[in-house]
């Protein structure tokens, strides 16, 4: 995971008022305003802050991780204001469940695609469930990427055959075996979505990817 929070991520999140939530108190800090308190929450990045409670009188800012199984309840009151973050994707991005995705154009190697994504504010997509994968296939198909190859953020560079996501997320799910992939051994260490096979495939990382329209399509995701 990137340690910083990109401008795209900040812009993509919106805090909305709420009455009561259950969750865990991550930390309590001092903030001059609700906005500053919200930025504190966003700056925590991947540790799960998705709600804040702010008390103007004492400039108290509580950062909260929502958790429906937690016994701790946080409520709004005459003194405390409670806000919950809601993911709002930037223009030209698509929201699927709790993530934003962007389909990039241009000719790039896998490493260039990863850099390009970081510049736009997120990693190459890590796809971790069947539902997410199916949604992405449907979306790409809808975008007209019918026979193309699309870089995603997986590789087996460190150890042949051991696939990892560049985000550090667990490689819990794969879409390769149904088309006899991966088949490239040490010559193919990066992952693509192979639209014609509705599957993933290993591919040479240094290839400059192009799809049927002569453009690279890079799936970029930012997860909440
Ligand atoms: Ca390989
Ligand atoms: Ca292959």
Image (cartoon, grey):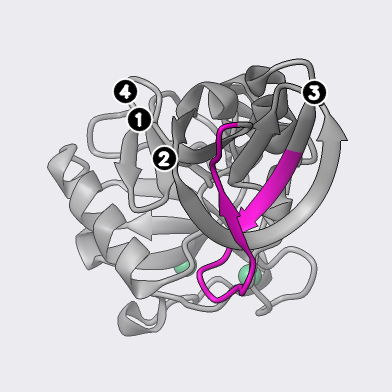
The residue lying furthest to the top in this view is: 32
Q: Which residue is mark 1?
A: 93
The residues bearing labels 3 and 2 have C-alpha atoms spaced at a distance of 29 Å
Distance from label 4 to label 2 (Cα)?
A: 10 Å
Question: CB atoms at circles 4 and 1 under 8 Å apart?
Answer: yes
- Which class describes the residues within 10 Å of circle 1: few (<14), some (14-19), or many (20+)? some
Toward which corner of the image does residue 89 lie, by quadrant?
A: top left
State which region is magenta. 62-78
**Residue drawn 70% across the image and 30% down it:** 55
On screen, residue 101 versus residue 109, left or right, reads left
Which residue is tagged 4?
92
Q: Secondary structure at mark 3?
A: loop
**Callout 4: helix, strand or loop?**
loop
Considering the numbered disc 1 on the image, is that residue within a helix, a strand or a loop?
loop
Q: Nearer the viewer, mark 1 or mark 3?
A: 3
Badge nearest the viewer, 3 or 4 = 3
CB-based contact (under 8 Å), mark 3 and mark 2: no
* Residue 25 in sight: yes
Nearest to the observer: residue 26 or residue 122:
26
Q: Which mark is residue 100?
A: 2
Q: Pointer 1 and pointer 2: residues touching (CB < 8 Å)?
A: yes
| Residue plotted at (14% across, 43% down) | 142
Q: Are marks 3 and 4 in contact (CB under 8 Å)?
A: no
Point out the tag, 1 or 2, that comes first from the N-terminus: 1
Q: Residue at x 74, y 56 (%)?
A: 25
Whichever of callouts 4 and 2 sits on the residue coming sooner in the sequence is 4
Compute the Cα span from label 4 to label 1.
Answer: 4 Å
Disc 1 versus disc 2: distance between alpha carbons?
Answer: 6 Å
51 and 133: which one is in front? Answer: 51
Q: Which residue is mark 3?
A: 31
């Amino acid at each position: 995971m990137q340690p910083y929070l990109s401008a795209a991520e900040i812009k993509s999140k919106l805090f909305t008022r709420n009455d009561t939530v259950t969750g865990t108190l991550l930390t309590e800090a001092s903030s001059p305003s609700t906005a500053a308190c919200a930025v504190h929450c966003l700056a925590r990045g991947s540790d799960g802050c998705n709600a804040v409670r702010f008390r103007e009188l004492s400039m108290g800012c509580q950062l909260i991780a929502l958790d429906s199984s937690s016994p701790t309840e946080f409520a709004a009151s005459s003194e405390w204001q409670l806000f919950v973050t809601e993911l709002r994707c930037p223009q030209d991005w698509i929201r699927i469940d709790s993530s934003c995705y962007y389909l990039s154009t241009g000719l790039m190697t896998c490493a260039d695609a990863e850099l390009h994504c970081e510049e736009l504010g997120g990693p190459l997509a890590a796809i971790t469930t069947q539902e997410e994968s199916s949604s992405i296939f449907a979306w790409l198909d809808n975008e007209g990427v019918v026979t193309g190859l699309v870089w995603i953020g997986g590789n087996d560079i460190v150890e042949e055959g051991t696939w990892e996501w560049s985000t550090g997320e667990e490689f819990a799910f794969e879409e390769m075996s149904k088309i006899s992939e991966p088949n490239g051994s040490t010559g193919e260490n990066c992952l693509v979505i192979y639209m014609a096979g509705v599957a993933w495939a290993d591919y040479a990382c240094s290839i400059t990817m192009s799809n049927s329209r002569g453009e690279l399509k890079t799936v970029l995701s930012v997860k909440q």
